[in-house]
Amino acid sequence: MGRFYISFKVALVLLALIFCVSACQKDGLDERVVQQKVSPKPSNEVEKAEVKEEKIKIGFSMDTLLEERWLKDRDLFKKEVEALGAEIEIMAASGDDALQISQAEALIREGVDLLVVVPHNAEATAAIVHKAHKAGIKVIAYDRLIKNADVDLYVSFDNEKVGELQAKALTKLVPEGNYVYIGGADTDNNAHLLKKGVFNVLQPLIDSGKITVTYDQWTKDWSPANAEANMAAALEANNNRIDAIIAANDATAGGIIKALEAKGLAGKIPVAGQDAELAGIQRIVQGTQTMTVYKPIKLLTKESAKLVVQLAKGGSVDAEQKINNGKVEVPAVLLAPLAVDQANIEDTIIADGFHSREDIYGMTEK
Ligand code: BGC
């Protein structure tokens, strides 16, 4: 009888527990449904509700922190997300596809509310989107598009325009002659968009016989050393007779200019890059690089953080543009890039505080 009494008491406690857990879960669910219905146009009432809700947590899965720009992206994006009252956890995969996928899986397991991905490999990272969606987590492709997956939103710069700006600047200086194109990593969708932009401008000049592209090669993993080797091969193959070089970014332009230095040609052949890296801007000042394309990272991080937090709260985003990723038309927000050469460093890079005058010119201020 005593034993029966104890078991009866235990059963009562268990019943009470089960009741409480399901009631709590239901409350949580209801709250989320209410949220989804009212966003994205929050009234004062909803804003009050949002203050009360649990902190949103964003997972940020990055390819690499190697180039200077990605450190800016990481730091500024964190700042912007936190300024909106959300938390962020950041992981970088050092260009390793398997590691990027396992890091993203860890973020999904931790239960982040939304995943932001800078893919190392546009195709391989589709696996991240499938896994996140299975867990009910939306995925935003940041700066680089993820291919062949139901990506929820893509936020970047207009990369085709970047290529067009590079080619326009160089063809203005060198309307005829032998061109070299050293592209980015074949595995990065941006590298393809950049190349498309470059050839939008070059093709009519190629067709009219004014320009010949004597060398055209991707750069594995965007590595400056690979770009240097490619450039050395291009010089070799053309007996140094090259009139203009378009590099997919400033880091690869750095490698290319090393190969030119080795032949005493640095500063003699115009070179275009992108990113407005400090070293790139310094080379523009010294005259070994002709131009770069500036992409205001601060704007990208601010815009992305706003949209990401909005989506994480269950709201939707009105994106005017769409970009096909091989599977779906991904809603896209594409910001405008800007051509920079010696003439406008002051009004762009310095005015925006992207780099300081001291950092660019060293002790000898302009
Ligand atoms: C980015 C560039 C960057 C390159 C290498 C591209 O996807 O758009 O800004 O230089 O990757 O990291």
Image (spheres, grey):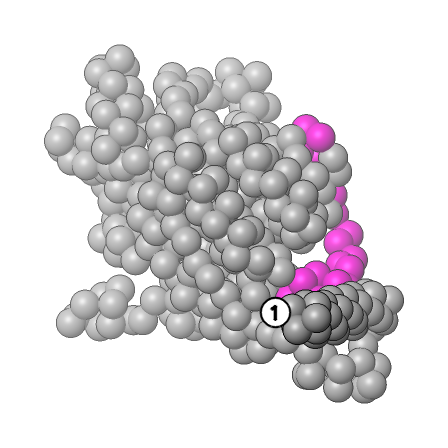
Left or right for 240, reference 300: left
For mark 1, give the secondary structure. loop
Task: Report if residue 108 lies within the magenta region.
Answer: no
Task: Report if residue 324 lies within the magenta region.
Answer: yes
Residues rendered magenta in the picture: 309-327
The structure residue drawn at horizontal position 37% and vertical position 37%, both measured from the top left corner, is 96
Compare residues 244 and 53 and report the one nearer the observer: 53
Please identify the quadrant where the N terminus is shown. bottom right
Compare residues 115 and 148 and report the one nearer the observer: 115
Is residue 78 something one can see in this rendering? yes
Residue type, label 1? Ile
Residue 120: percent from left, percent from top: 45, 38
Compare residues 13 and 176 and report the one nearer the observer: 13
Picture layout, residue 244 above or below residue 12: above
Picture layout, residue 214 above or below residue 30: above
Residue 186: percent from left, percent from top: 45, 27
